[in-house]
Image: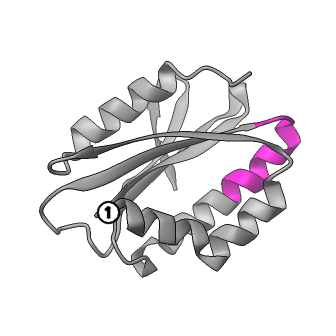
Amino acid sequence: MLSIFTRRFLWSKFKEGPAGRTPGEVFVIVTHFQAERLRDLPGIAHSSYSLRQRWPELPGAVGVWTWLDWRNKRVGSVSIWKREQDMRAFLRWEPHVKIIRRYRRAGVTTSVSWTSETFDRRATHARAVQELSNWKQPG
């Protein structure tokens, strides 16, 4: 369910994961997928939303936002994990692997990540918006 506009981005509501209320350090990763063709974006966005729906199944997942930038053919997420290893397990999770295989030739994925001593939802979202606003297409 997409709901929040910030500049040109359409953001989902925050989806809490099973580690959402666990105190301590977190690993944050902002991903952006730059599609080559606008016609691929609806399928990619739908796939992103389907993964978001399954967030409560993921060990170590603190939470996630998904975002969409139609004008620039971009889609991605801001996911928060207890540890980087938890995120890496997600990358190997079969539903995620299937989506990556389906769309790997449809564009380019890049990311930026950081760790924080604690999870502050507002500060994390603000930094993610800043990262995405400053993002430059590779190449």
Question: Callout 1 environment at 10 Å: few (<14), some (14 to 19), or many (20+)?
Answer: some
- Residue shown at 46% from the left, 32% from the top: 5
Q: Does the magenta stretch include residue 42?
A: yes
Q: Compare residues 68 and 107 and report the one nearer the observer.
A: 107
Please, what is the dominant secondary structure of the magenta stretch?
helix
Give the image quarter of residue 58: bottom left
Q: Which colour scheme is used?
A: one colour
Q: What residue type is labelled 1?
A: Arg
The residue shown at (50%, 28%) is 132
- Vertically, is 4 above or below 24? above
**Residue at the outermost left position:** 23
Q: In the image shown, does 128 or 113 lie closer to the viewer?
A: 113
Q: Does 86 sit left or right of 83 as displayed?
A: right
Considering every residue shown, the one lying at the far front of the view is 85
Say whether residue 54 is visible.
yes
Quick check: is 50 in the magenta stretch? no
Q: In which quarter of the image is residue 14?
A: bottom left
- Quadrant including the C terminus: top right
Secondary structure of residue under mark 1: loop
Residue 7: percent from left, percent from top: 48, 22
List x then y, in percent, for residue 39: 87, 42
- Looking at the image, is 20 positioned above or below residue 105? below
Whether residue 15 is visible here, answered yes or no, is no
**Residue on which the image places disc 1:** 83
Q: Which residue is pictured at 73% across the width and 64% down the height?
A: 99
What span is colored magenta in the figure? 35-46
* Residue 36 place in picture, x, y as percent: 84, 34
